[in-house]
Image (cartoon, rainbow, N blue to C red):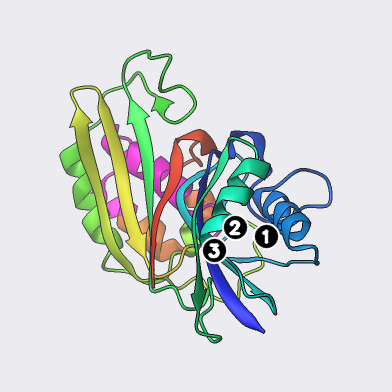
Amino acid sequence: MMRYFIWFGYDGANYHGWQIQPNGVTVQSELQRCLSLLMREEVSVTGAGRTDAGVHARQMAAHFDTEQVLDTALMVKKLNGLLHDDIAVYSIQRVADDMHARFSATSRTYHYYIHTHKSPFLQQYSLEIHYQLDYALMNEAGRILMEYEDFGAFCKAGSDVKTTLCKVTEARWVQTSPTEWYFEITANRFLRNMVRAVVGTLVEVGRGRMSLDEFRLVIEGKKRTQAGESMPAKGLFLEEIKY
């Protein structure tokens, strides 16, 4: 058996997330369907993580095993011809047998995009907001995140996780134009719904509805009900995975 990594991106608007679901088309199911068709064998792909329904990925990785020696450049071309326009394969490469798309990853970076003006070109990929935010204060709260390791407060209720520990190494708001911002967060791993819950709680801080001390108490309380609302999926992008 040989192991291959596949690097790709997708617009998640039309998918029920990454992971195969019994009722609904997912990115994983589409990728496996097209790979299996081209390779004429049952192919199973393991992703670097799971994105929820409607979440996008600028860079995602997965691995699959096969006994076939692949012409990777040709496979990329054929896959892109077979996949829908909202999934694009960037590259396929042979890797060591012990390389694992999920467990070998050292960090993942997400961006959450917001804008403050109506734009027909941002509606699918950014959240339009109509209230003032204190970005300097939200950046102070972002630095507080890096002091903690248990993020149970931002984990979707009922999630089947063995641990809620994560190491956050970056958490900041970046301005890209007078009316556009994104929140960047990097960690070794993320919990289900974590980024959208973190952003929702930071927005509470930015609106003056939660103090920095109260933000600390939310993290320390480890209860999802104390944190802010989960922001809509459309503004969230998995931006980068490092190995």
Find residue 197 and name its label.
none
Q: For this rendering, which residue is in front, 10 or 146?
A: 10
Earlier along the polypeptide chain: callout 1 or callout 3? Answer: 3
Residue beneath label 2, please? Answer: 75
Q: Nearer the viewer, mark 1 or mark 3?
A: 3
Q: For this rendering, which residue is in front, 192 or 9?
A: 9
Residue beneath label 3, please? Answer: 72
Residue 68: x and y in percent read: 68, 75
Earlier along the polypeptide chain: callout 2 or callout 1? Answer: 2
On whether residue 201 falls in the magenta region, the answer is yes
Circles 2 and 3, Cβ within 8 Å, touching? The answer is yes
Q: How far apart in space, not on screen, are marks 2 and 3 (Cα)?
A: 5 Å
Q: Nearer the viewer, mark 2 or mark 1?
A: 2
On whether residue 122 falls in the magenta region, the answer is no
- Judged from the image, the secondary structure of the residue bearing numbered disc 2 is helix
How would you rate the neighbour count of disc 1 (Cα within 10 Å): few for under 14, some for 14-19, many for 20 or more?
few
Q: Which residues are magenta?
A: 191-215
Residue found 41% across the figure and 30% down from its top: 126
Overall secondary structure of the magenta section? helix
Residue found 73% across the figure and 53% down from its top: 29
Residue found 67% across the figure and 67% down from its top: 160
